[in-house]
Amino acid sequence: MIYEQITLNTPYMSGNQFLNFFLLSLVEMPGSILGGFMIGRLGRRWTGVTFLLLMAIVCLVAGAGPQDVTSLIITCIILAK
């Protein structure tokens, strides 16, 4: 659910919406490769747990962090994707 909302919320992020969408799209390839590699090593359950925990922590940092530092928020959102 959060994964889809990050993509749909791209126009409302601060900065250039086209650059933000490009960066979010660019993150897809390494994430897919890393996910496939981790599934082979750890299995589906622990890979899912690892990625969901990482996404939750990064989203909490983006939400609880200072709102005037837009580069931190965008970086956290890209890492959460």
Image (cartoon, rainbow, N blue to C red):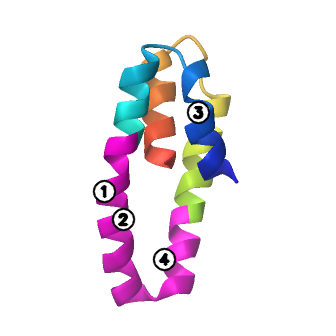
The range drawn in magenta is 25-51
- Kind of element beneath mark 4: helix
Q: Nearer the viewer, residue 33 or 67?
A: 33
Q: Residue at x 35, y 88 (%)?
A: 40
Residue to which mark 3 is pinned: 62
Residue to which mark 4 is pinned: 47
Marks 2,1: beta carbons within 8 A? yes
The span from disc 3 to disc 4 (Cα, nearest Å) is 23 Å
Location of the N terminus by quadrant is bottom right
List x then y, in percent, for residue 43.
46, 89
Q: Nearer the viewer, residue 68 or 23?
A: 23
Q: Residue at x 50, y 15 (%)?
A: 69
For marks 1 and 4, the one nearer the N-term is: 1
Is 7 left, or right, of 2 in this rendering?
Answer: left
List x then y, in percent, for residue 4.
62, 48
Please name which of the two marks, 2 or 3, marks the residue nearer to the observer: 2
Q: Amino acid at mark 3?
A: Ala
For marks 1 and 3, the one nearer the N-term is: 1
Residue to which mark 1 is pinned: 29
Residue to which mark 2 is pinned: 32
- Kind of element beneath mark 1: helix
Please name which of the two marks, 1 or 4, marks the residue nearer to the observer: 1
- Kind of element beneath mark 3: helix
Quick one: label 2, few (<14), some, or many (20+) residues within 10 Å? few
Q: Quadrant of residue 8?
A: top right
Q: Amino acid at mark 1?
A: Met
